[in-house]
Amino acid sequence: MFAEELTASSAKKRQEQNRARRRQIKQQQQSRQQQQTAAAASRQTQNVSRTSSSIGGGGGGDGEAANGNDNGSAPPSQQQSSQQQQPQQPQQQLSAVERAAAERKVRQILKHQNRSATAIQSLFRAYRSNVALRQYQGDLLDGRLADLQTLGNLLLKSNKTKGEGGGGGGG
């Protein structure tokens, strides 16, 4: 009976060791996956921030001259913040909440850009259709005015011919 207890406890020990090993492997895999998703999320946010800054700050040279930048890159405050973020990224792992927030921010920016593009296209199409309608109505009016002018000239000629022929006989 004592031997059975010893063998059972050694089997339990092996089971516990195997479980601990599996947990450790799983944790390592999760940490690698978090690092990969964090790197992907940071690349997405950097791409979106670059896109939004190029869309928002589309002025080019004037804004850089006003900021005092001679090297043609981002303003000094953005340079410092990007330099500070680069060394910290490998050490810092984004949590699921932070990743979700970054992805949400990317989706919001893309949604805003899509809405803006749709509004601009809608306004341009309305303007273009209004110009075309105005041109069509103007051409139609010009044609009708020309017809009225011709009709007026014909009426004047017919009145003159009636006046000349009918005036000599009544007296």
Image (cartoon, rainbow, N blue to C red):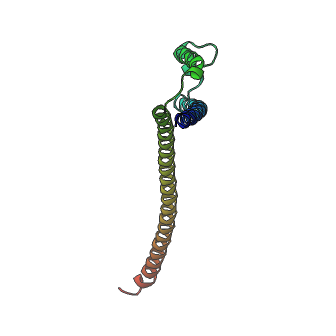
**Residue 37 visible, this angle:** no
Q: 87 or 147: which is nearer to us?
A: 87
Name the residue located 52 percent from the left edge and 34 percent from the top edge: 2
Q: How many marks?
A: 0
Depth check: give the residue in front, 9 or 146.
Answer: 9
Answer yes or no: is residue 67 visible.
Answer: yes
Whole-percent x, y for residue 42 in the image: 57, 30
The residue sitting at the left extreme is 171
Vertical comparison of 113 with 130: above or below:
above
Among the 4 quarters of the image, the one containing residue 90: top right
Q: Position of residue 17 (x, y in %)?
A: 58, 31
**Residue found at the very far bottom of the displayed protein:** 169
Image vertical order of residue 46 relative to residue 116, above or below: above
Residue 12 on image: x %, y % = 54, 35
In this view, which residue lies farthest toward the front?
1
Quadrant of the snapshot with the C terminus:
bottom left
The image shows residue 85, relative to residue 120, as above or below, that is above
The residue positioned farthest toward the right in the image shown? 71
Instruction: Give the x, y percent position of residue 37.
Output: 58, 34
83 and 122: which one is in front? 83
Kindly identify the residue that appears in the image at 49 percent across and 75 percent down: 154
Q: Which corner quadrant of the image does residue 58 belong to?
A: top right
Residue toward you, 112 or 140: 112
